Image (cartoon, rainbow, N blue to C red):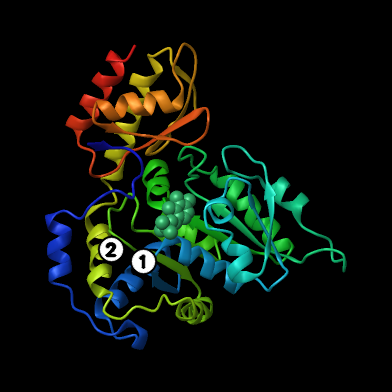
């Protein structure tokens, strides 16, 4: 099967497995796991942040950040398509006791003007606005990358109104490779950043939360409360170190593969509107004739290709490191032969 359902379906290859076997470990709750300490230092340095915290999942690292930045009853400003809002099980309410002010943006990206308009006045009737969350790349936006000038304008609004700014960077490495940006510009701009290692980076589990020393101290406490303090998780952190050393630049290959598949799809009359393909995600409408997203995904499955119908009108495909050039060629051929 050629699996385009998500970039979470990757499995560790021989190099990554070898790194796990050779990992030095200790008890991370005591701060004594050398592999975790190394990964945290590596990530903090890469993004130019003071400190980092290894977390079991991106959901947990986002939720920890939101909990640290807010008090119960506060309001979090984000896109109506944000993962933190629609795909984390209501975690903002459950874990932080905060509520969301959701903004309808462009492909999950919001503007500084929209953020400013969403901030509540200092009035007892209103929830206290305390945090803005951005997502880069934007998952439901088809893997699109934020315009950096807009991010800087949002930072200014946050400074003016004393709001914290968190980045859900589940696919931040994809954005960095696609735009050629300096990772440290992210460290300078955001108060906290969550980056996933279990997506395009190809690790079986793991995310890293980045922030100031004080922020990470508090985040470590919340991670423990959530049951996310792991012991010899250095065996897993070793996959993150391996991915940092081997899997960043190769994301460019995934982006090229996504563009090849997009070109094949755009030849077909069943392909309706497709979101611009900027990184490794394709989201397109299926229209006309007898085709529906369900029928198309069923047809492709019979040909050995797994895709996902994500709405009554849209199909999503995600490219990742277990997708080879041969698989892309086969996929393009199957698409070309689909009538
Ligand atoms: C995958 C993802 C996460 C975190 O997911 P986990 O499966 O919990 O690691 C967070 N944000 C976005 C945008 C994602 O795509």
In this orientation, which residue lies closer to the viewer: 139 or 270?
270
215 left or right of 157?
Answer: left
Q: Residue 332 is drawn in which quadrant?
A: top left
Left or right: residue 73 versus residue 256 is: right
Residue at image point 33% right, 56% down: 198
The image quadrant where one finds the N terminus is top left
Question: Which of the pair 225/151 is nearer the observer?
Answer: 225
Callout 2 environment at 10 Å: few (<14), some (14 to 19), or many (20+)? many
Residue drawn 33% across the image and 37% down it: 255
Picture quarter with the C terminus: top left
**Which comes sooner in the sequence, label 1 or label 2?**
1
Residue at (34% x, 58% y) in the render: 197
In the image, residue 93 sits, relative to residue 146, either above or below, namely below
Up/down of 10 relative to 306, above or below:
below
- Residue 243's disc number: none
What crowding class fits label 1: few (fewer than 14 Cα within 10 Å), some (14-19), or many (20 or more)?
many
Q: Position of residue 265 (x, y in %)?
A: 37, 20
Residue 177: x and y, percent? 36, 45
Is residue 64 positioned above or below 117 on the image?
Answer: below
The image shows residue 58 at horizontal and vertical percentages of: 43, 61
Asked if disc 1 and disc 2 are in contact, CB closer than 8 Å, the reply is yes
Instruction: Answer left or right for 54 relative to 164.
Output: left
- Foreground: 239 or 337? 337
Residue at image mark 1: 43
* Residue that label 2 marks: 240
């Amino acid at each position: 099967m050629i699996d385009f359902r998500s970039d979470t379906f990757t499995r560790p290859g021989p190099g990554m497995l070898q790194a796990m076997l050779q990992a030095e470990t200790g008890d991370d709750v005591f701060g004594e796991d050398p592999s975790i300490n190394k990964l945290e230092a590596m990530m903090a340095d890469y993004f130019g942040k003071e400190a980092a915290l290894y977390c079991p999942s991106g959901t947990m690292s986002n939720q920890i950040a939101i909990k640290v930045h807010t008090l119960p009853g506060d309001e979090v400003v984000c896109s109506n398509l944000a993962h933190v809002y629609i795909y984390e099980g209501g975690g903002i309410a459950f874990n932080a006791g905060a509520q969301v002010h959701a903004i309808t943006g462009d492909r999950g990206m919001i503007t500084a003007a929209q953020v400013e308009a969403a901030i509540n006045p200092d009035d007892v009737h209103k929830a206290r606005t305390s945090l803005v969350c951005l997502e880069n790349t934007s998952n439901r936006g088809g893997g699109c990358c934020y315009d950096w000038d807009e991010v800087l304008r949002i930072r200014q609004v946050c400074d003016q109104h004393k709001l914290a700014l968190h980045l859900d960077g589940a696919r931040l490495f994809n954005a960095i490779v696609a735009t050629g940006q300096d990772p440290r510009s992210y460290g300078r701009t955001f108060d906290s950043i969550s980056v996933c290692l279990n997506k395009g980076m190809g690790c079986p589990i793991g995310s890293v939360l980045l922030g100031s020393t004080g922020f990470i101290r508090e985040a470590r406490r919340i991670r423990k409360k959530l049951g996310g303090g792991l012991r010899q998780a250095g065996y897993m952190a070793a996959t993150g170190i391996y991915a940092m050393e081997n899997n960043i630049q190769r994301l460019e290959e995934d982006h090229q593969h996504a563009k090849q598949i997009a070109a094949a799809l755009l030849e077909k009359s069943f392909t309706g509107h497709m979101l611009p393909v900027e990184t490794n995600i394709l989201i397109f409408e299926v229209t006309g004739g007898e085709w529906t997203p369900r029928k198309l995904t069923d047809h492709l499955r019979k040909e050995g290709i797994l895709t996902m119908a994500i709405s009554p009108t849209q199909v999503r495909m995600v490219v990742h490191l277990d997708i080879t050039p041969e698989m892309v060629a086969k996929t393009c051929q199957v698409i070309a032969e689909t009538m």
